[in-house]
Image (cartoon, helix red, strand yellow):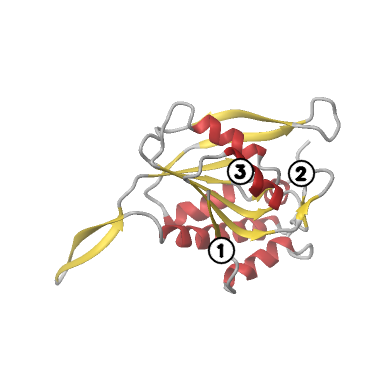
Amino acid sequence: MKIHYISEKNSVLNHFLGQIRNVNVQNDSMRFRRNIERIGEIMAYELSKILPYKEVEITTPLGIKKTTQIETDLVLCPILRAGLPLHNGFLNYFDHAENSFVSACRHHPNNDDEFEILVEYQAISDLNNKTVLLLDPMLATGQSIVAVHKKLVENATPAEFHIVVVIAAPEGVAHLEEHLPENCHLWIASLDEKLNEKNYIVPGLGDAGDLAYGSKL
């Protein structure tokens, strides 16, 4: 799997990453959503550099200009609900893309720290021969992304598959490397230290879904 680390060089991306982590800033849910959206825009720009392009001619009021445009068909797929602000950022740049939606959540059948991933709601477009961008702010254990990837490719063969996360734990990256095909791309804005005993990312930022949309029962 090809891994792309976006925040290794200083840029405004690190400014927004700092704000979504900061306990004195992140509790403003509107600002948190907007910062995730801005991070999505930056990551969309970086990802766009490796997409296939074709040459075209554009008619201007004064003549003809040769340029390039994205050649592949894109499908954006956020994992609900935390992936929605990240999806908005990507959609701001890839406004011509199709969109699919999938939910995934941790289910604790014994009410302890052990869990399984439930992939329930699905609204998936035709993914055959298209470039799929799977969007999720947090890569903790990696089990949700593996489960969703399995669901998306059950009846389809995408041309390319990109996974985009804002914050990742090394354990999650290793899990994806073990369970996903080698031709997948993984885009990470920031790699953190570890998972704690409850499989939360440290130092992380907390629960991205709750910070964006409020606490759940």
Which one is nearer the viewer's eye here, 107 or 182? 182
Q: Are circles 2 and 1 on residues that touch, CB within 8 Å?
A: no
Q: Residue at x 56, y 63 (%)?
A: 6
Which one is nearer the viewer's eye here, 68 or 40? 68
Above or below: residue 105 compared with residue 34: above
* 2 vs 1, front mark: 1
Q: How far apart are marks 3 and 1 (CA)?
A: 18 Å
Q: Which residue is drawn at 69% across and 55% down?
A: 29
Q: Where is residue 47 in the image (x, y as percent from the top left)?
A: 46, 58
Check disc 3 and report the residue beneath it.
Answer: 176
Is residue 61 found left or right of 37 in the rendered image?
Answer: left
Q: Which residue is drawn at 73% across and 61% down?
A: 21
Above or below: residue 194 compared with residue 65: above
Residue type marked 2: Ser
Q: Which mark sits nearer the N-terminus, 2 or 1?
A: 1
Q: How many labels does the image show?
A: 3
Which disc, if any, is residue 6?
1
Check disc 2 and report the residue beneath it.
Answer: 215
At label 1, counting other C-alpha atoms closer than 10 Å, the crowd grade (few under 14, some 14-19, many 20 or more) is: many
